[in-house]
């Protein structure tokens, strides 16, 4: 039984792994605008609350 499995695996062929011809390109479209605006708005709000007389 074990010999049959080994013989089948040896005659199954060779697996070949080749690197692609072109470089792999991963595009990351990350939008951080919303987070920056939120942080600026929060900072501005804190500044206004800390210094109400400057406006």
Image: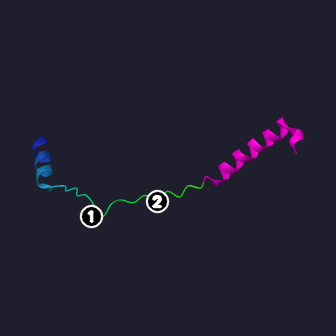
Q: Circles 1 and 2: CB distance less than 8 Å? A: no
In the picture, the disc for residue 46 is none
| Residue in the picture at 15% in, 55% down | 14
Q: Label 1's element?
A: loop
Q: Could you say where residue 11 lies in the image, as x and y percent from the top left?
A: 11, 54
Q: In the picture shown, does residue 21 fall above or below 34? A: below
Q: Nearer the viewer, residue 19 or 55?
A: 55
Residue at the bottom extreme of this rendering: 21
Residue with the mark numbered 1: 21
Q: Could you say where residue 44 lies in the image, as x and y percent from the top left?
A: 77, 44
Residue with the mark numbered 2: 27
- Label 1 crowd (10 A; few <14 / some 14-19 / many >=20): few
Q: On the image, which quarter does residue 20 sit in?
A: bottom left
Residue 33 located within the stretch drawn in magenta: yes
Q: On the image, which quarter does residue 49 sit in?
A: top right
Residue at the top extreme of this rendering: 50
| Residue in the picture at 11% in, 50% down | 10
Residue 39 located within the stretch drawn in magenta: yes
Q: Could you say where residue 54 lies in the image, as x and y percent from the top left?
A: 86, 42
Asked if residue 34 lies left or right of residue 47, the reply is left
| Residue in the picture at 27% in, 64% down | 21
- Label 2 crowd (10 A; few <14 / some 14-19 / many >=20): few
Magenta stretch bounds: 32-55
Q: Earlier in the sequence, mark 1 or mark 2?
A: 1
């Amino acid at each position: 039984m074990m010999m049959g499995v080994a013989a089948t695996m040896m005659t199954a062929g060779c697996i070949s792994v080749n690197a692609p011809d072109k470089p792999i390109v991963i595009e990351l479209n990350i939008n951080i605008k919303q987070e920056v605006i939120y942080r600026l708005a929060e900072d501005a709000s804190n500044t206004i609350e800390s210094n109400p007389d400057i406006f």
